[in-house]
Image (cartoon, grey):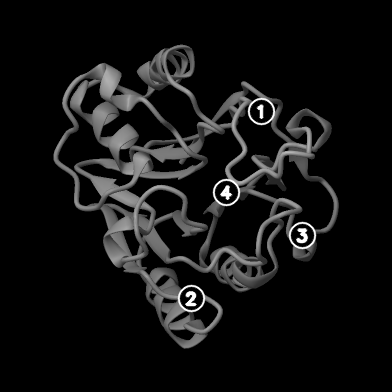
Amino acid sequence: MCRMMAVVGDARMQAQVLEAFHPLGKDGKVRPWETPGHLDGWGMAKYTPQGPLLMTRSGGDVDREGEAYGAASMHAIALEGALVMVHFRKATIGDVRPENAQPFVHRRWLFAHNGTIMDLEKFGPKPVTEGSTDSEDFFRRWCAQGKDMDGYRGWVETVANGCRYTSLTSLLCDGEVLLACRRSSGRLFEGCPADVDPASLPSPYTLYHWTDGRSHLFCSEPLPLLGSGWRALENGELLTIHL
């Protein structure tokens, strides 16, 4: 379970959202039995006219690395481009190191994921990856298919029908379109105590959308900075925004 966001807007909007999102590293929602925080690595990327560009990926605690987060934010804001994506990791599969932090970039694709996916080996040998997470495995298998954005829904359905997973909730951008997907199974809850029924708990794999008609923001949970107007994506919903 992680916290992630993507903002589409001008530099002022990007700056406000990046500052407002940072506290979720320490204070973002977790499941009742989990330790607080999403502090197992973090990353930030911007989609520039030349393509997706990683500002940084760190295996560190984003709360303690606030200065580095601020520097990456300033770098991102200064670059041309309407979209910034950020991810704070709470590790499940894969050790804590920079290569396992998100977002991931491959060719024209920029990607972030919240959830755990098992059994991807059903779809053939693991592709070449920089790290050891299920999220990157899922992403690279998608990239290898050579499809356009419209094909992502089919890939989500294929994995949902063939794998055990907690969530396929994700953000995907190709420079022209930002796609937000919310897909939670409710079947697997890592570390859930035996006396807790997962079905009795609200899903932690939420994704919210906010817009004022000019800017758009997708975030794992609403940011108080922007007040009301947030809409929770329905489970199974995919929403696209043209940049």
How packed is label 1: few (under 14 Cα within 10 Å), some, or many (20 or more)? some
Given contact means CB atoms under 8 Å apart, are the residues at marks 1 and 3 in contact?
Answer: no
Tag shown at residue 61: 2
Q: Are marks 1 and 4 in contact (CB under 8 Å)?
A: no
Q: CA distance from mark 1 to mark 3?
A: 29 Å
Going by the image, does 49 lie left or right of 39?
Answer: left
Residue at (70%, 68%) from the top-left corner? 27
Location of residue 80 in the rendering, given as x and y in whole percent from the top left corner = 36, 62
Residue drawn at point x = 50 percent, y = 75 percent: 62
> In what element is the residue under mark 2?
loop
Tell me the distance, in whole angstroms, between the alpha carbons under discs 2 and 4.
Answer: 15 Å
Pair 2/3: label in front: 2
* Mark 3 touches mark 4? (CB < 8 Å): no
Q: Nearer the viewer, mark 3 or mark 4?
A: 4
Q: Is residue 77 above or below residue 166?
A: below
Name the N-terminal-most of marks 2 and 3: 2
Residue 186's disc number: 1
Query: Regarding mark 1 in the picture, which secondary structure is present there?
Result: loop
> Counting residues from the N terminus, which is met first, the one under dot 1 or under dot 4?
4
Badge 4 marks a residue whose secondary structure is loop
The answer to which of marks 2 and 4 sits earlier in the sequence is 4
Q: Nearer the viewer, residue 103 or 196?
A: 196
